[in-house]
Amino acid sequence: MLSSARWWLALALLATPAWAEGDAARGRAIVTTRQKGLCLLCHSGPFPEERFQGNLAPSLAGAGRRWDAAALRARLTDSQGLNPDSIMPSYGVANSLRDVAPAFRGKPILTEAEIEDVVAFLLTLTADE
């Protein structure tokens, strides 16, 4: 069961305004870069140019077919709120990080705009590898 704060967060995510549309090209850069999203440490996907991809989490191939924008947004923003046992970090929750450098304390891993960019990109992944 979601706590009261996480319930309101979930409602806010579902009510993201239509103008908050992300940019798929920027989202692809976040997913594939080793400096920002680090998604490919755990996930694999249709990224032949990336030699080293993870196998701890589901493949991102077909993500846009398996989940809608709201579900992807919720998973990215607060994955541990959806599944407390998840090893995926909550990219949009500012207080979810532990043992981090002072410059990163109290800040989410990704901004709201970056999360929207990643959602826009993942929605383009509709085919299996």
Image: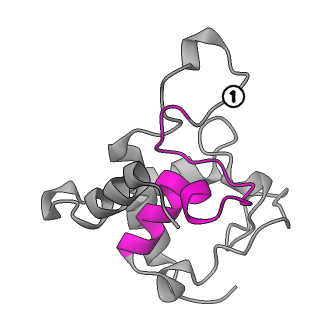
Q: Is residue 90 above or below residue 100?
A: below
Residue 50 appears at what percent x and percent y? 75, 57
Quarter of the figure with residue 40: bottom right
The C terminus appears in which quarter of the rendering? Answer: bottom right
Q: Residue at x 65, y 35 (%)?
A: 35
Residue 36, can we see it? yes
Nearer-the-camera pick, 71 or 83: 83
Residue that carries the numbered disc 1 in the rendered image: 98
Q: Which element type, helix, strand or loop, lies under badge 1?
A: loop
Q: Report if residue 48 lies within the magenta region.
A: no
Residue 121 appears at what percent x and percent y? 45, 65
Nearer-the-camera pick, 117 or 87: 87
The colour mode here is: one colour
Q: Is residue 75 left or right of residue 17?
A: right
Q: Residue at x 73, y 68 (%)?
A: 48
Quarter of the figure with residue 46: bottom right
Q: Report if residue 86 lies within the magenta region.
A: yes
Quarter of the figure with residue 81: bottom right
